[in-house]
Amino acid sequence: MVSASDTVALRQPDPGPSDTGHGASDSDQALPLLARARAAAAAVTDPEIPVVTLEDLGILRSVSLAAGRIQVVLTPTYTGCPATDAIRDEVARALERCGVRDPDIRIELAPAWTTDWISPTGRDKLKQYGIAPPQACAQPGDTASAVLRFVARPRSHKGLACPRCEAHAVELVSEYGSTPCKALYRCLSCREPFDYFKPY
Ligand SMILES: [Zn+2]
């Protein structure tokens, strides 16, 4: 018997269940359905930046169990992000692989995703991948940032450092990098171009 509503806090994913053809092993079966579903959804990677997971990016908002059905809430990085359908499909496949039947996968656009939701682990992974992580635009306790969330943040690269050599001497090449949510910069020290994940 499951409770009507049972939500687990998001945390680092457990090692995913092994795929051994004939369904889950004994140890996998021992894991509650919700824990398996949460681990599977959290481990799905972003189709555009495969080194970061949906959990790293803060796209995975919640995994819960209600009336015996797994519900997953996702918030895409921006409205109309072309990767949204791909992300939803990937989550559905990951859940199916760990034995979740008929999950309820919801896309919620409010509150709007912000780069502030990217975890410290996610920021490290972006940097290792050669993408400068978004600069924090607000100090903790700056309530104005929450109020002004829907106002475009100023285009500033103050504090931005080259992800390869850490130099701060950088120049904007294009407002748009490999995807609309990134800008293309060049490092004036090592001369390498790099993507900057723009803060939202
Ligand atoms: Zn550099």
Image (cartoon, rainbow, N blue to C red):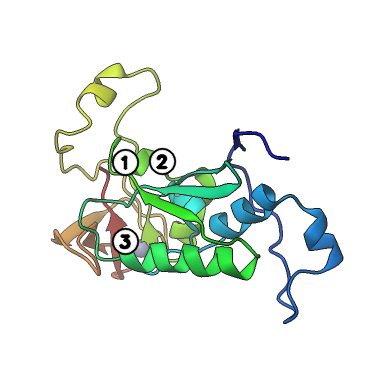
* Mark 1–mark 2 CB contact (< 8 Å): yes
Name the mark on residue 70: none
Label 1 amino acid? Answer: Thr
Residue 61 is situated, as x and y percent measured from the top left of the image, at 45, 43
Q: Which mark is in front, 1 or 3?
A: 3
Q: Secondary structure at mark 3?
A: helix
Q: Tell me: 52 left or right of 48.
A: right
Specify the label residue 114 is tagged with.
1
For the residues labelled 1 and 3, the Cα–Cα distance comes to 15 Å
The residue tagged with tag 2: helix, strand or loop? helix
In this view, the residue in front, 174 or 12, is 12
Q: Give the residue at mark 3.
A: 84
The answer to which of marks 1 and 3 sits earlier in the sequence is: 3
Could you tell me residue 123's position as x and y percent? 46, 50
Query: 74 or 196, which is in the foreground?
Result: 74
Amino acid type indicated by mark 2: Trp
Residue 123 seen in the figure = no
The residue that mark 2 highlights is 117
Residue 166 in picture, x, y percent from top left = 41, 55
Which quadrant is the C terminus positioned in? top left
Residue 161 seen from this side? yes
Question: How far apart are the alpha carbons under marks 3 and 2?
Answer: 17 Å
Q: Is residue 193 left or right of residue 54?
A: left
The answer to which of 198 and 20 lies nearer the viewer is 20
Q: Earlier in the sequence, mark 3 or mark 2?
A: 3
Label 1 and label 2: CA atoms lie apart by: 6 Å
Residue ID at (30%, 35%): 111
- From the viewer's perspective, is residue 6 above or below residue 32? above
